Amino acid sequence: MAYSSRRFFTSVASVPAQQDASGGYSRSESPLLISRRDRMNLTDEQVAAIDIFRRGATAKVNAFAGTGKTTTLEHMARSRSSKGLYLAFNTSIAAEAQARFPAHVDARTTHSYALKHLSPLLRDGSDKVVRTLNGNQIAELLTIRDIAVGSRLTVTARAVGHLVARTINRFCRTGDRTISARHVPTYGKLLACDEASRDVFFDQVVELALHTWERIQTPDDPTPLDHDGYLKLWSLSQPIIDADFVLLDEAQDSNEAVLSVLAAQDCQVIYVGDRHQQIYEWRGAVNAMDKAVVNAEADLTQSFRFGQQVANVANCILSRLDESKQVIGNPVIDSRINEGYVSAVLCRTNAGVLGVVLEELARNRVPYVQKGVDDLLRLLKDVERLRSGIPGASDEFFGFANWREVEYFAQTDDGEGIKPIVSLVRKFGESVLLKKLGRVAKHASGAEFTVSTAHKAKGLEWPGVAIYGDFVSKDERGQAQLRPGSEESRLLYVAATRAKEALHMPLELLEALGIADTISAPVGERKFYPQTAAMQPAERSAPPQGSTSIELNRPF
């Protein structure tokens, strides 16, 4: 694909400003409060999006990966002097926005804004608001007993409490006003139960969840209120947001509870996101870029993050998602496929992360696991419990009485999701795996490279990214293929677009995408180098002395 012929940078058109009788500016006539330097750093698309905002329209801004959406939102905020609210996906983004945005715009996470407006009777009780609902605590408070599901499964009281907590969490992320069976998750051994027995069990879970939800809303009741809970209570209160405009960032990862609030507002709402980066559908996320009703739309297709070769890979994936538009690479970045240093290895699963960690520790290299190793430790601790006949607490092992049951289930079609971790445990043993994880760097600064799942890599970027082989599966003939389903393609799109200068992909993945013949760099015996080297792009063609390789082709 050739570079776009239009100018990469453009100045903002001058728009006359007119004051109203009160001395302020109307939405459509407010001045652009942008410096001359900033004006030169905006694309035509960004200017168009800002203009839609200045006209007061409720709109969507469809922003591909790395296309400067936060900068666009900042300039929107600066183009008006009226009261605004910026809602971020997480606390780090909110903190960054608070430092960058003008004082008349309140930058918060959605949860922070909801907590601010929660009833003091609930908010001010230090013991009431907690991070997560505790299944054990629910089981004790409600005196839950073991429940039989058909004739082949008995769910322990502790596991029932865990399922009740997850049911409430799923309900809280929806626009529903009451809990029903559709909010009960199906995972672990429940996947193997017959439908009739499962339905009876789900009715019991719903009854317990309804009772728990009532207790959660009672200020002097010890049943905890977690983050999703107070967000739901705020949504159910039908709040009126005290702002002239709302900027919702990462709108593809919002949920029905938030969208129902925004849809009911009289103020202007701007939904900004990338519909193809929705990767949290499994936990209740709703893609506002598809669902929200708006008056106007704008597109951001010019990436500032990566060059055209990475953009070509991204567009190949986007075509599988029926996207008609294409992301355009930054012409000033010489990004390469299968050339250059790697500072991060991105995997599809936690098992893939663990596999990379084991391989590289064996080569005396020190990795850092993005957001820590708690998820991996939790899985392995559950393996230890199951070997002792104690049910595990993780979703992956829900309902299993012992490890033998897990191993048998992993051999079935329903158990494909846990097969990788079972294979690793069978090969190394959980005690060895736990010991190995103790050698992982506590901070990225003390590591040679980063390992992450694609989910945890979202919103981040690295100079060089390698995609691990667990994004590929085998068909009935043993041929490599992309894992089926649009969510799998979206996950791969997120992973590939984390790269700035170098994107490394296994041969099987390139073949599955149908682009292996377009890559000039050799494939197969490929070298991957430490994170420190990735920070030296001028030397990326010459490997440092003593560097070792990472085998990325083999999925677990």
Image: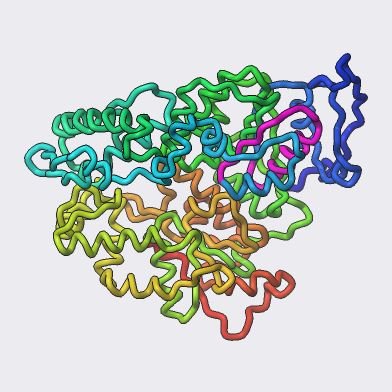
Is residue 74 rendered magenta in the image? yes
| Rendered image quadrant of residue 184 | top left
In which quadrant will I find the C terminus?
bottom left
Give residue 116's quadrant in the image. top right
Which residue occupies the foreground of this view, 75 or 551? 75
**Location of residue 331 in the rendering, given as x and y in whole percent from the top left corner:** 77, 52
Position of 226 compared to 291: left or right? left
Pick the residue in front: 326 or 219: 219
Magenta residues? 64-90
Q: Is residue 125 above or below residue 493?
A: above
Residue at the (21%, 37%) spot, across then down: 142
Colour pattern of the rendering: rainbow
**Residue 250 at least partly seen:** yes
Residue 143 place in picture, x, y as percent: 18, 40
Residue 293 image point, x, y percent: 58, 20
Q: Is residue 224 magenta?
A: no
The residue sitting at 74% across, 40% down in the picture is: 74
